[in-house]
Image: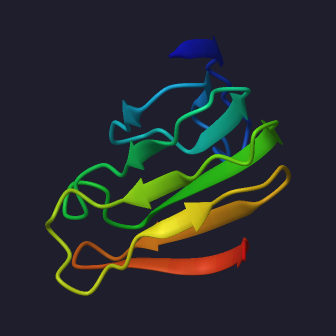
Amino acid sequence: MKIVGTYFVDDGSIRAVSRTETAITLLVGDQLVLIDTAKDAGFSITLPSVGASAFTYVSIVTLNNVNTVDVTIRDRGDDDEFTDIILDAAEEHSTLFSDGLRWYEVTGYHE
């Protein structure tokens, strides 16, 4: 994973920004993941623990997806109702919120 940087905004709106082109498991506090890939095979982004991430948001955005590979957003198996989300084109995105028990997609654009 390539770390672009960690940014702290006065209102605390962005804590961490990561840029990746390979599978990663997010940590509690990661809030924005930028996906930039020209790979031929899909990969997964695994969300942090739903309980440890209570009352936080995570946004995942595909900047480039040259070969239209599947980038699958998964939970850690600790949310019985979460369904994988697949981003398979450039400029698709998903923003998720944890209430401590479940992940909810609050906004997103993906087919």
Location of residue 64 in the rendering, given as x and y in whole percent from the top left corner? 82, 37
**Figure check: 12 above or below 22:** below
**Figure check: 42 above or below 108:** above
Location of residue 109 in the rendering, given as x and y in whole percent from the top left corner? 77, 73
Drawn side of residue 68 relative to residue 84, left or right: right
Location of residue 34 in the rendering, given as x and y in whole percent from the top left corner? 69, 36
The residue drawn where x is 58% and y is 12% is: 2
**Figure check: 91 above or below 64:** below
Residue placed furthest toward the bottom: 81
The residue drawn where x is 61% and y is 39% is: 33
Location of residue 101 in the rendering, given as x and y in whole percent from the top left corner? 22, 78
Quadrant including the C terminus: bottom right
Colour theme: rainbow
Which is more toward the observer, 61 or 5?
61
The residue drawn where x is 75% and y is 39% is: 67
Drawn side of residue 35 relative to residue 63, left or right: left
Q: Could you say which quadrant of the image residue 81 lies in?
A: bottom left
- Number of numbered discs: 0
Drawn side of residue 47 relative to residue 104, left or right: left
